[in-house]
Image (spheres, grey):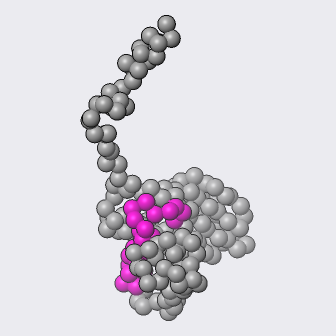
Amino acid sequence: MLILLLLAGFSIVPTSLRAESGAPPPTFDVPFDDIDPAVAQAELTRHIAVFLNRLQTYRGSSPETIRDQVTGDIERNEREALVVAKRFADHGVLEGYDFLEGSLIAGQYLVLQRPVNGLNEFIDYYEALKTSLTEHYGQPSEDRTVWTNDLYQPLPDYWGIAVQMGHLRYAARWDTPAGMITIELT
C-alpha cells in the first residue's frame, strides 16, 4: 500500500519538476524598475522643484499652514519639525520641514532606498538634480566629491556601491538671496 501511495504521489508532481521531462525550466522577465532612467530623473527633478517652491513660498509660515499644503503620510508632527512620507517610483521619500519659533526656516528632501535600476542610479539622480539646480541658480558655490575609502575609485561602474558603503559622498551648495540650497548623496 505504501508503494502505491508513493507512486501516486510521484505521478501528481508537476511535469516541470520531473527530471525526465526534458523541458527547460520556465523563465521570468521581471524588471526591477519599469521606469526609464531619464524619465525617473526628470520626475525626481520636478518633485524637488515643487518642494523647493513650497519652501520658498511658505518661508516663515506655521507648521499648520505647511501641513495643509502637503500630501502624504505624516510621520512626525512636532512644533519644530514636520516629516511627510511619500513615494517616488519605487523609492521611499521623506519631506522634512524645520521650524524655529513656529516659522518655517528650512527643509530636507530625502530619497530613502537602495537603487533598483542599476548600481549608479542615485548618482545619476544626483547629477540630474545638480544640473537642474545649476541651470536655475548658476554654478554651485561649493561642489565636492569625497572619497573616504578609494577601493572603488578606479571602477566607476561600482561607485554606487561605494556610496552605499559610505566610501563616497557627493555634495553641492548654492547661496541664493532667499537662503542656501544644498544637495548631498550619502
Q: Does residue 182 appear anywhere in the picture?
A: no
Quadrant of res 169: bottom right
Identify the magenta region: 111-136
**Residue at 52% across, 58% down:** 92
Quadrant of res 36: bottom left
In the rendered image, residue 167, in percent from the top left (x then y), is placed at 56, 78
**Residue at 39% across, 62% down:** 117
Quadrant of res 146: bottom right
Viewer-proximal residue, 30 or 81? 30
In the rendered image, residue 123, in percent from the top left (x then y), is placed at 44, 74
**Residue at 41% across, 79% down:** 156
**Is residue 65 toward the left or the right of residue 4 in the image?**
right
Residue at far left of view: 23
Identify the image quadrant of the C terminus. Answer: bottom right
- Relative height, residue 75 to residue 11 (above, below): below
Residue at far top of view: 1
Q: Does residue 142 appear anywhere in the picture?
A: yes
**Is residue 53 toward the left or the right of residue 85 in the image?**
left
In the rendered image, residue 89, in percent from the top left (x then y), is placed at 42, 57
Viewer-proximal residue, 26 or 121? 26
**Residue at 56% across, 57% down:** 85
Viewer-proximal residue, 83 or 148? 148
Residue 132 belongs to magenta span: yes
